[in-house]
Image (cartoon, coloured by chain):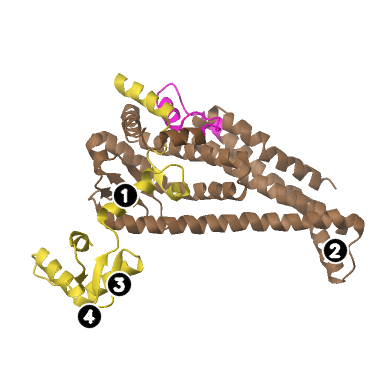
Amino acid sequence: MLAPGLLAALAVLLAWPVPLLLSRAKWTHRSPAAALVVWQAIAIAGGLSMIGALLTFGLAPFGEHLVSGAIGFVTTVGSGEPVQPNELWNVLALCAAALLTAHLLLNLVLTVVRSERQRRRHAELLMLLSSPMPSGYRLIDTPAPIAYCLPGALRSVTVVSAGLIELLDEPAMRAVIEHEKAHVRQRHDVVLVLFRAWHASLPWFPIAYRAQREVALLIELLADDYARKSVHDAVLEGAIARVGAGRDDTGAASASGEWADAASPDTLTVRVSRLNPQVSALPPAVEATIVAAAVLLLAIPPVLLLMPTALAMVR
Amino acid sequence: MDLLWASDESLSAYDIQAALAGADDSGRTLAATTVLTVLARLEAKAFVERERSTRPHRYRAAASREEHMADLMHEVLGGASDRTAVLERFVGQVSAEDAAQLRRLLSGL
């Protein structure tokens, strides 16, 4: 049986070298949408192949393929026969597969519930402290230049501060609003929650942290691209620079230590540096190839898992 | 809520109802039950505290507007803590290096 070995090799590749390469790649910032698809494919295919490798290895002595193996395992356990000593490792692998699946799913649920609770609390506070504006966002009366959006299942809220309105002129304000609108429209919160859950389930795993960071940056780049459709590049650049330069005093010292291990350069520098005509998006054909490769990658673990079963059925 | 924040002492629902009617010159008065419903909701969310020793019950803001604002700002501006994870900010963490780069850029604009 080849499947366990192949799946394990894939799991190792997707756990370490591939994400590392991707986070160092230069093209990702030119085509954030395609890069985001690749990241999601890596996360899902990586998890599937890890669980799949354990599962196929565990079931190997009980049957030729996944289905017959599962039936064989259930009947062996059901008949009350003691497990043979040479099958001990296989049973351990099965337990590990079950635990890993439960762990990943549980963390996903926990992360979703936790962020939903935070979101609701923040929204309650926000509703008391902010006033609605005619253009659909809410205003908080504070001198600090702030703009953010609070994503919600049904309704998202975009918030700006009085300080921001004072700091930015009309077109720059539009750039900020369009940027936040993109977050809301493209449901970036869903992608973020997936990667936060991944990081939460594997906190000791540096790649998961790096992936979460990289995905967060890609989302900002996507939102910038959306804003660029309605405002000039220089306007957006000015908006980012003005808001950012006024904010360096808040927690910069503590942050620099924390972020230092990430090889990617600073977020805002990346965002500003790509806002010029020389940095063009990747050609559509290249983007399509990247997305197709991601879909292919996503298909490998299920194919490896189910292929032997399908072949056995055909025979 | 603004009334409770502005008031030093606790208010009964009827005080609030009267004050709201005075503030709004359209002449309409909110029903006392409406005021009580809103207060009960605010109490459930721990924004308002109720004094049960008196009758009618009197209500007081649990924390000042400034305290809530500080709380909100902490969430919005706060570092990489878990509490800020739900927000998608236009500009999130700003590192010292970023800030220097941006100031150079601004002086050139």
Q: Which chain is yellow?
A: B
Residue at 31 percent across and 24 percent down: it is B106
Residue that badge 1 annotates: B70
The image shows residue A257, relative to residue B37, as above or below, that is above
CA separation, marks 2 and 1? 62 Å
Residue that badge 4 annotates: B55
Whether residues under marks 4 and 3 lie with C-beta atoms below 8 angstroms apart, the answer is no
Whether residues under marks 3 and 2 lie with C-beta atoms below 8 angstroms apart, the answer is no
Q: Along the horizontal axis of the image, is A185 left or right of B6?
A: right
Residue that badge 3 annotates: B40
Nearer to me, A225 or A214: A214
Question: Which chain hosts label 1?
Answer: B
Q: Identify the element where label 2 is drawn.
A: helix
Q: Identify the element where label 3 is drawn.
A: helix
Residue at 91 percent across and 60 percent down: it is A84
Residue that badge 2 annotates: A72
Colour assigned to chain A in the rendering is brown
Residue at 76 percent across and 58 percent down: it is A95
Question: Which chain hosts label 3?
Answer: B
Q: Quadrant location of residue A128?
A: bottom left
Q: Nearer the viewer, mark 3 or mark 1?
A: 1
Which residues, given as a range, are shown in magenta?
A: A259-287
Q: Amino acid at mark 1?
A: Ala
Disc 4 crowd rating (10 Å Cα; few below 14, some 14-19, many 20+) is few
Q: Are marks 2 and 1 on the same chain?
A: no
Q: Amino acid at mark 3?
A: Ala
